[in-house]
């Protein structure tokens, strides 16, 4: 059997991902897959949080075992066995930014298909080090690039001297 998970970002109405995962995938391998899918740098600390049905944090899974298990020793099936229907992949610990992965059901394994895999994608990837998810990243960049407050490299405004 293959498990289907929906990825969403709290506060965003446009971001959506659907993934098919095998039951035996470790959280560490899922982390590697998600980093590649989002285009994130792999050298950052990450963690998973498991949530109960009332939305309370039930478990925290890190690279090192802090009591609930290390990411490489916990499978996605283990989280379901602990009744964690939703897990959060926290990719930015400093700003507490993550993607909520909610269990949606099971489907049959397809021959000649490699898992894990992305099956649906809407919205743009979040910025790895941003404090918020913005649907208007391109619009923001256009506004910034046309701003009078920006100077060419090594160019200072008139009357300002280098220290």
Image (cartoon, grey):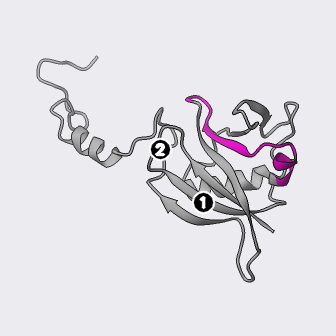
Mark 2, other Cα within 10 Å: few <14 / some 14–19 / many ≥20: some
Name the element at disc 2: loop
Which residue does the numbered mark 2 point to in the structure image?
Answer: 127
- Which x, y percent locates residue 27? 77, 50
Give, as a single range, the part of the protein colored magenta.
77-95
- Which x, y percent locates residue 98? 59, 40
Splitting the image into 4 quarters, where does residue 115 fall? bottom right
- Which x, y percent locates residue 68? 86, 35
User: From the image, which quarter does the C terminus lie in?
Assistant: top left
Mark 2 or mark 1: whose residue is earlier in sequence = 1
Task: Please state if 46 lies on the left or on the right of 157 as rendered.
Answer: right
Name the element at disc 1: strand
Q: Is residue 12 above or below residue 16?
A: above
Q: Are marks 2 and 1 in contact (CB under 8 Å)?
A: no
**Residue placed at 56% from the left, 57% from the top?**
17
Task: Please state if 65 lies on the left or on the right of 53 as rendered.
Answer: right
**Residue placed at 45% from the left, 40% from the top?**
133
How far apart, in angstroms, are the residues tagged by discs 2 and 1? Answer: 19 Å
Splitting the image into 4 quarters, where does residue 114 fall? bottom right
Can residue 72 be spotted in the picture? no
User: From the image, which quarter does the N terminus lie in?
Assistant: bottom right
Can residue 57 be spotted in the picture? yes
Residue sticking out furthest to the front: 54
- Which x, y percent locates residue 61? 79, 38
Mark 1, other Cα within 10 Å: few <14 / some 14–19 / many ≥20: many
Which residue does the numbered mark 1 point to in the structure image?
Answer: 18
């Amino acid at each position: 059997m293959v498990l289907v998970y929906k990825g969403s970002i709290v506060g965003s109405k446009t971001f959506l991902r659907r993934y098919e995962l095998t039951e035996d995938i470790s959280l560490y391998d899922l982390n590697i897959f998600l980093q590649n899918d989002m285009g994130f740098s792999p050298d950052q600390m990450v963690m998973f949080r498991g949530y109960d049905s009332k939305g309370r944090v039930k478990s925290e899974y890190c690279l090192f075992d802090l009591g609930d298990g290390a990411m490489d020793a916990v499978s996605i099936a283990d989280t379901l066995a602990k009744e964690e229907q939703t897990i959060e992949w926290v990719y930015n610990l400093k700003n507490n930014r993550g993607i909520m992965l909610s269990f949606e059901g099971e489907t049959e394994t397809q021959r000649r298909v490699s898992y894990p895999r992305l099956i649906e994608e809407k919205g743009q990837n979040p910025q790895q080090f941003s404090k918020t998810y913005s649907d208007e990243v391109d619009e923001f960049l256009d506004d910034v690039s046309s701003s009078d407050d920006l100077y060419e490299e090594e160019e200072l405004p008139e009357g300002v001297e280098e220290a």
